Image (spheres, helix red, strand yellow):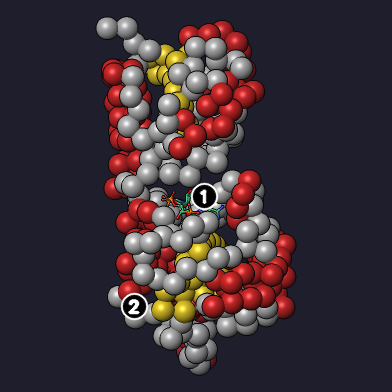
Amino acid sequence: MTRPDILMTAPMHPAAAARLDQRFALHRLWEQDDPEAFLRSHGAVIRGIATSTLYGRVDDTLFARLPALEIVASFGVGYDNVDAEVAATRGIVVTNTPGVLDEEVADFTIGLLLATIRRLPQAERFLREGRWPHGPFPLSPTLRGRRVGILGLGGIGKAIARRLEGFDVAIAYHGRTRQEAVAYPWHPTPVALAAACDTLIAILPGNAATRHIVDAAVLKALGPNGVFVNVARGSVVDGEALASALEDGTILAAGLDVFEDEPNVPPALLTSRNAVLLPHIGSASEYTRAAMGALVADNLMAWFENGHALTPVAETRF
Ligand code: NDP
């Protein structure tokens, strides 16, 4: 059997890479002495890409150099790192890894929410810095009595909502469309959702339509007791408006796993005492990253075995 040539753009879970090595001629772009020269010499034979947010954007610039490209298998459910619309016009299938990370990211979001409201990282720093003997850690805000708005009630949003039901808090949501099968109140705009809540969790895709969907008006509507948690993408919030809102008390606190220019974090957030900042680790357990890697490999194998990707993104469901 011929071994199709696959380009891996950045390191991926080792088990996935090992499976791909067995079935394909796998080329690790980051290991090439001269990646540009590699693309010039091998670009014509590459039929598949395995990529992730660790690599820059996979777009027309790269597609134009890979004339035999059939499929881009992206690691992660968010695929804003791939220009899927242009891929569609070129007949290239794009796949992502939906479903296998929902429960993990939902667990994580609850952890970040509680850490932000009860100020757990600040309390731990207080203890480690030897300040406890001088007096107790200040009282924190609470989750009790909160009204939580979920911005993007998809696979992960619903898994978060299921968990929140156990915390006995009110739940509402916003998406472009009201979901008939969902009993939580729907609000037609992000501002309306924020106005009806005091806690806002963003878990929707990052794309042109959602860029800065959480802006100064949404943060103002959330109010001075407001807690904003972003586990979506950094692009969904206006970073400057958020930093100001934290600084001037427009909102109470923020828990952020994602940033607009990762891995760079704005200095205003780094110095904010009411923000909990994490390095984009929502799905980053060994267990779940292995499952995501397996789905990347399964998509490539299914495509080259029977011409059907398992989880193509909406733009490329040919
Ligand atoms: P889904 O596709 O299942 O759900 C997305 C939800 O967002 C839908 O309910 C959709 O509702 C809503 N939505 C989409 N576009 C808009 C819009 N323009 N305005 C308002 N709502 C919108 O995705 P997942 O739940 O699987 O994942 C969501 C996102 O979470 C991913 O795209 C990714 O960016 C991020 N993520 C982050 C992780 C991390 O490590 N921090 C890990 C995993 C995911 P409707 O169609 O009705 O608008």
Q: Quadrant of residue 273?
A: bottom right
Q: Which residue is mark 1?
A: 205
Instruction: Report the residue at 56% width, 8% height from top.
Output: 41
Which amino acid type is marked by label 1?
A: Pro
Q: Is residue 318 above or below residue 241?
A: above
- Quarter holding the C terminus? top left
Left or right: residue 30 versus residue 211 is left
Which amino acid type is marked by label 2?
A: Phe
Label 2: how many Cα within 10 Å (few below 14, some 14–19, many 20+): some
Ligand 1 neighbours mark 1 (CB distance < 8 Å): yes
As drawn, the label of residue 235 is none
As drawn, the label of residue 167 is 2
Instruction: Report the residue at 32% width, 67% height from top.
Output: 162
Give whichever of 147, 183 is nearer the camera. 183
Residue 122: x and y in percent read 52, 75
* Local secondary structure at mark 2: loop
* Local secondary structure at mark 1: loop
Label 2, label 1: how far apart the Cα atoms are: 26 Å
> Considering only order in the chain, which callout, 1 or 2, is on the residue closer to the N terminus?
2
Residue 239: x and y in percent read 68, 60
Task: Point out the residue furthest to the bottom here.
Answer: 135
Q: Quadrant of residue 192?
A: bottom right
Give yes or no for contact between labels 2 and 1 (Cβ–Cβ under 8 Å). no
Q: How many marks?
A: 2
Residue 27: x and y in percent read 45, 18
**Residue 3 seen in the figure:** yes
Give whichever of 204, 9 is nearer the camera. 204
Residue depth check, mark 2 versus mark 1: number of the one nearer the observer:
1
Instruction: Report the residue at 63% width, 46% height from top.
Output: 208
Residue 54: x and y in percent read 52, 38
